[in-house]
Image (cartoon, rainbow, N blue to C red):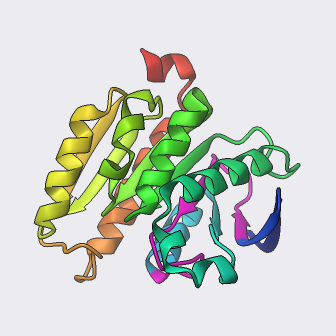
Amino acid sequence: MVTEEIKISLKGTTLEGDLTLPTNPKGLVIFSHGSGSSRFSPRNNYVANILQAKGIATLLFDLLTEQEDSIYQNRFDINKLTNRLIQTTQWIYHQKNTTGLPLGYFGASTGAASALRAAAFFENSISAVVSRGGRPDLALDDLDKVKAPTLLLVGGLDTKVIWLNQKAYEKLECLKKMEIVPGASHLFEEPGKLETVADLAALWFDKWFGKTKEDVSG
């Protein structure tokens, strides 16, 4: 297992990230964090650690620079965040140590919207998407274009977000599943609930990283 601090050179900016590669990884999951968060998100790092233990590579990175993040409106600019995720994915495609790996997205909170919009952009090039307590409704206009099998995870106590996820679930035309985690709030802070999320996410990625495009479309 190797973890490397990386600089992601994009047009006009450089983003910082942490890339972890297990031996012979099954695939790579790129994390899209929620508003006001970063690559240091303790919840996303917890999930990433579980994925890594299952042989899945992870990339946690900052979608905004420090200066950009200081402007509150940027944190909710889904267009900007989606574009950053798309550019970062394209950057990953060209790195020697990640070439050819199946790719997936893990989106938390508002990050789920940028993950799903990026998945719609890449179509069949993304193997799977997982949303944790996400706001997929913020990507409503693009959901019917998502090809990647998508798992929506929502806390059973997070009633408003359950409704928003159900609305988004109906719009998705890909292979899809919605799991409500009983007794969990929006951040899954209750004992054992984040572990449940991580285990469900790992199973989902593990399943779809091993499938062909024909399996997914069929």
Looking at the rendered image, the quarter that the N terminus falls into is bottom right
- Give the left or right position of residue 130, taking residue 75 as reference: left
Q: How many labels does the image show?
A: 0
* Magenta stretch: dominant secondary structure: loop
Q: Where is 121 relative to 10, above or below?
A: above
Q: In which quarter of the image is residue 94?
A: top right
Looking at this view, is 122 or 101 the one in front? 122
Residues drawn in magenta: 18-42
The picture quadrant where one finds residue 197 is: bottom left
Q: Is residue 193 left or right of residue 103?
A: left
Depth check: give the residue in front, 127 or 195. 127
Tell me where residue 186 appears, x and y as whole percent. 24, 72
Magenta span contains residue 19: yes
Residue 111 left/right relative to 187: right
Residue found 68% across the figure and 82% down from its top: 67
Q: Where is residue 138 in the image (x, y as percent from the top left)?
A: 35, 52
Q: x, y (%) of residue 104? A: 56, 46
Q: Please say if 210 is above or below 105.
A: above
Q: Which quadrant would the C terminus be assigned to in this image? A: top left
Residue under the image location 43 percent in, 77 percent down: 43
Q: Can residue 181 be seen in this view?
A: no
For image coordinates 53% across by 52% down, the residue present is: 79
The residue drawn where x is 41% and y is 46% is 204
Q: In the rendered image of this protein, does residue 165 appear above or below residue 149?
A: below
Residue 208 horizontal side relative to residue 131, left or right: right
Q: Is residue 41 visible?
A: yes
Tell me residue 164's x, y (percent).
Answer: 20, 53
- Closest to the observer, 3 or 110: 110
